[in-house]
Amino acid sequence: MKKILIKNIDTLISCDEKDNIYTNTNILIEDGVIKDISNTEYEDCEIIDAKGMIVYPGLINTHHHLYQTFTRNIMAVQNMELFDWLTHLYNIWQHIDSNIIKYSSFVGMSELIKSGCTTCFDHHYVFKNQAKSDFIDTQFEVSKALNIRFHASRGSMSLSKKDGGLPPDSVVQNIDDILKDSQRLIKKYHDSSDNSMTQVALAPCSPFSVTKELMIESAKLARKNNVRLHTHLAETIDEQNYTLKHFNKRPLEYMDSLDWLGEDVWFAHGIHFNDEELKVLAKTKTGIAHCPISNMKLSSGIAQVPKILDLDIPLGLAVDGSASNDGSNLLEEIRMCYLLHRLNSSTKAPTGYDILKIATNGSAKILGRKKLGSLKISNMADLFMINKNKLEFVGANTDYKSLLGTVGLKNNVDMTMVNGKVIYKDNEFKTIDEEKLLYEAQNAFMNFKKYI
C-alpha cells in the first residue's frame, strides 16, 4: 500500500457532519483513502510538509460546459440574455470538432484544478447531426491525463428550430442515435465505486431543445442503468413562458409529468421556482446546481438560496459554461455567491462557510458521491491547500472556514490532490506540461477563431 503523511497542517477545515476544525495536525493517506487525522507520526510514508497551510476538502463542480472555453469574451453576446445568447452562439458551436473538445476540456479542467476543484461534472450537449461522436470519449481521455475526477453527461438536443425548439438542425440528433450512444458511454465509462474517477449521467439539454419522448426515454434508460439525470430548468422567464405555451405547464410541473423528479435528478440553475415548487423539490429530494456568476452575466435572476437551504433541498455549486462565466474558477464562484446573497438577502444570506459546504458536501450529494465532499476517516483524499502566510491574508486569520467566501483567494491554490495524488503544486501541474498545453491550445483556438 502506498502511504502518504501530510504533516504539520496549520488548520484543517473538515466540512464534516460536526464541522470539525483541526489545528497542528497530520493526515495519513493509504491508497487514496484518509486513514487518520491526528498528531500521530507514521513511518514508511511519503512526507508532504504542510507547514503554514490551510487544508480544505476538494471543491466539486456540478454544472459546466467545457466546450464553451473557446467562445469566451465575445463582444456580440455580452449584453444578451439566454435565448438570444444561445441563438447567436449555436451558429459558432456547430463547428466544434474533437480537437476543440480536447483543448477546451484541457483548458477548462486545468483552470478548475488551479482553483482547488477535484471533481468536475460537464454537461456536453452539442453534437453534430450524425450518429457517431467521440466527443465524450475525448473528455474522458483529458480527465485521465489530468487525474481529475470526471462526471460526463451524455447531453442531447432533439428539437430543432423548425419543430418549435431553439437549436438549429445542424446540432440536433435523432432519439435512437442519442439513446444508443448513451448506453455505449455508460457501459464503457460509468464506475459506481467509492473511489471512481469516471461516471456518466444522462442530460437532455432543456425543455426548449428536446422532445418529450427523449426526456421520458432518457429517464428510463438512466434508471435501468442506475445513473443520474440532469437538465437545465427554471433558468429564465423565457423558459417558463415556453413551457406554459407549449405544454400548458410550468417547468417543474412539466418535469414531474415526465417522471423527472427524485434523488437521482438535479437541475441546473433553479432560479424561478415558486414556494410550492420548492416544497416539491424538498419532498422529492431533487437537487439544484447553483451558478451565481453565470446567472448574473446573463441577467437570468437570483436563485432563492436561503429558502433552498432552509428546506434542505440538495444544493451544489457550479461555474456553468465558460462562455457565460467567462471562466472555470470555483473559488471565484464561492466569493461571488457569498456577496450576491448578502446583497439580495441581508441577514438571511448564507455565511462564507455555508457556501464552502455547498461547494463540497452539497455538490458531492448531488452527484451521489458519499466518500467525497469532506475530510474524514474513510473518505477519499481529495483536497487542496492554501498558504495562510500571504500578504493578502494579514488580518484575516480569525475564521478560516469562512475565508474563501468573505476574503477570497485571488491567486491559484498552493496544492491540489485527487485520490491521494498531488496533481498541482507550487504553480506547476504534475501530470501535464502546461507550457506545451498553452501553445497547442492557442493554436487550436486560432484555427477555430474564423467561426467567431
Image (tube, grey):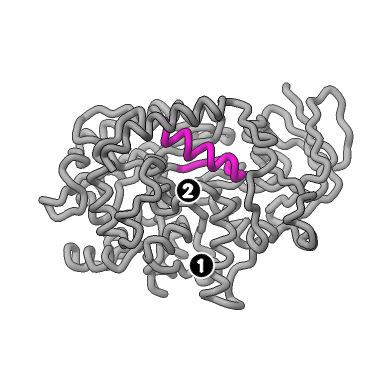
Q: Is residue 442 above or below residue 347?
A: above
Circle 1: residue type: Val
Whether 118 is among the magenta residues is: yes
Q: Magenta stretch?
A: 103-121
Whether 446 is among the magenta residues is: no
Q: Magenta-highlighted stretch: main secondary structure?
A: helix
Q: Is residue 436 above or below residue 154?
A: above
Query: Could you tell me residue 61's position as x and y percent?
Result: 51, 47
Query: Could you tell me residue 313's position as x and y percent?
Result: 50, 62
In-image side of 339 versus 129 (left or right): right
Q: Pick the quarter of the image with the C terminus.
A: top left
> Which class describes the residues within 10 Å of circle 1: few (<14), some (14-19), or many (20+)?
many
Q: Pick the quarter of the image with the N terminus.
A: top right
Q: In the rendered image, which residue does mark 2 sit on?
A: 327
Quarter of image, res 372: top right
In-image side of 330 versus 50 (left or right): left
What residue is at 69 percent from the left and 61 percent from the top? 402
Q: In the rendered image, which residue does mark 1 sit on?
A: 305
Of callouts 2 and 1, which one flags the residue occurring earlier in the amino acid sequence? 1
For the question of whether residue 59 can be seen, the reply is yes
Circle 2: residue type: Gly
Query: Could you tell me residue 395's position as x and y percent?
Result: 79, 62
In-image side of 433 versus 18 (left or right): left
What residue is at 38 percent from the left and 36 percent from the top? 225
Quarter of image, res 187: top left
